[in-house]
Amino acid sequence: MLTAELLKSSSGKIIFNDTGQNIMQLPVSAILEDFKSFGLILFRGFDVNYEQMKVFAEQFDATFLNQYNRPIVDLNNQFITLVDSGMHYIAPHCENANSPFRPDVVWFCCAVPAAEGGETLFWDGVEVWKAMSRELQQLFIDQKIRYVQKFLASHWQQFLGASATIDDVKKILDNMAGISYKINQDESLILEYICSGVIKTKYGNQDAFANSIISEYRNPRAIVTFANGSAIPVKVINEIQKILDDLIGFIPWMSGDLVMIDNSRFLHGRKSFNDKRRRIVTLLSDIKVSYEERTAENAEDAEE
């Protein structure tokens, strides 16, 4: 039989399989409803591999996004990559939240867990926002965030596709809000992206502090400021970090685990580890929103 329980310290959900059932037998509509409610689902006991992860994801009217600067696992499945290299701690972030290419869903599949450490960390951005003081909330309502990053030509070609040209880049970026950019002579790209640090979740239209402010702030090679270019005060960063420390969740990996994360709601990260055998793969996707759902969302926005 299938059993389910809530993940500790989180609104996420675990679906256990203790009967040897194939994950493809799960009802897609029921899983999607759970995903809309919980935002994070761990499938355990289904012995999922990276190929099954992609097939399972395809059932949700998914379109997949290329990832740059990560090793592709299988040339026949170019969207599936290994997670960030190294064994270091990874700070809280939403995938690609420092760019306009944020996916709806982040998928993780565990082939080999680390012997010790290496847990994936997660934070519910809705709960993070609720835990903030009114003064801190108002700061991020009033002030947008500015991310600046550099893409080598090889990076944006991996991201947009090997056949992409610099003209393709211009056509895409020129039609995106909050974007300014500079193209260098070597066709590397300096991208400046301005967006809010608090966003509306894809499902439920809730306010969520779901962004990459902390990870970019901790990264010496990255630039993150307020939209006007002023620095985000250390006091503000420390206040956010304290809230995150209080609301942290852990995924203690087991072989064959599959995780589905709402990237408009949950931040994720990683504990450090010391085991070269650890092998976690990832997949990024968008989920098609039905006409009925979009109409309902637009009606809610109009009422507000």
Image: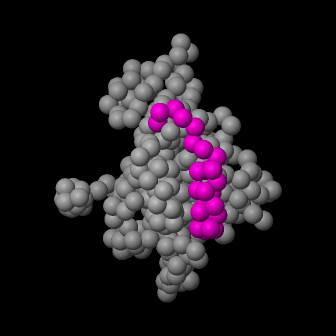
Q: Quadrant of residue 250?
A: bottom right
In the rendered view, does 286 fall on the left or right side of 238? left
In the image, what residue occupies the spot 49% across and 19% down?
A: 183
On whether residue 230 falls in the magenta region, the answer is yes
Residues 124 and 115: in front is 124
Q: Specify the farthest residue to the right.
A: 274
Residues 75 and 146: in front is 146
Residues 134 and 251: in front is 134
The C terminus sits in image quarter: bottom left
Residues 170 and 249: in front is 249
Instruction: Report the number of numbered marks.
Output: 0
In the image, what residue occupies the spot 44% across and 42% down?
A: 144
- On the image, the x and y values in percent for residue 137 come to 46, 56
**Residue 153 at least partly seen:** no
Q: Quadrant of residue 49?
A: bottom right
In the image, what residue occupies the spot 66% across and 69% down?
A: 252
In the image, what residue occupies the spot 73% across and 47% down?
A: 86
**Magenta-highlighted residues:** 227-250
Tell me if residue 246 comes above or below residue 140 in the rendering.
Answer: below
The colour scheme of the drawn protein is: one colour
- On the image, the x and y values in percent for residue 76 come to 52, 44
- On the image, the x and y values in percent for residue 102 come to 44, 46
Tell me if residue 250 comes above or below residue 79 in the rendering.
Answer: below
**Residue 217 at least partly seen:** yes
